[in-house]
Amino acid sequence: MRLTGEMPSLRNPPSGCPFRTRCPFALPACGEAVPELRRRPDNRHVACIRDDI
Ligand code: SF4
């Protein structure tokens, strides 16, 4: 997937996930904390709070 939209300011990044302002799957919870890197059952590593995308 290719992100569209403007890059957020590096001096004033958005709260939570740094992709939150451009991610089409963002939820309100995405702004609460930076997602931790974790391993999914298929052995891929992701830093996203959603399991359904
Ligand atoms: S945590 Fe996942 S769903 Fe939420 S904004 Fe970041 S990449 Fe998108």
Image: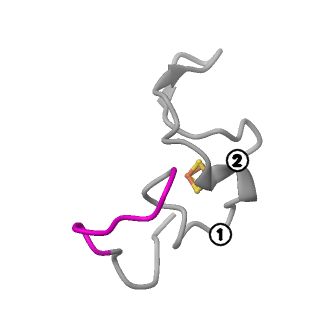
Circle 1 sits in a helix, a strand or a loop, which is it? loop
Q: Amino acid at mark 1?
A: Pro
Residue to which mark 1 is pinned: 24
Q: Amino acid at mark 2?
A: Ile
Name the quadrant containing residue 33.
Answer: top right
Q: How is the image coloured?
A: one colour
Query: Is the distance from the Cβ of mark 2 to the nearest ligand 1 atom less than 8 Å?
Result: yes
Question: Within 10 Å of the Cα at label 2, are there few (<14), some (14-19), or many (20+) other Cα atoms?
Answer: few
In this view, the residue farthest toward the left is 11
Q: CA distance from mark 1 to mark 2?
A: 11 Å
Q: Is residue 18 magenta?
A: no
Q: Position of residue 44 (x, y in %)?
A: 50, 24
Q: Nearer the viewer, mark 1 or mark 2?
A: 1
Residue numbers of the magenta segment:
9-16
Query: Is the distance from the Cβ of mark 1 to the nearest ligand 1 atom less than 8 Å?
Result: yes
**In the image, residue 4 above or below residue 50:** below
**Could you tell whether 27 is left or right of 36 in the image?**
right
Circle 2 sits in a helix, a strand or a loop, which is it? loop
Name the mark on residue 53.
2
Q: Position of residue 7 (x, y in %)?
A: 33, 77
**Could you tell whether 27 is left or right of 35 in the image?**
right
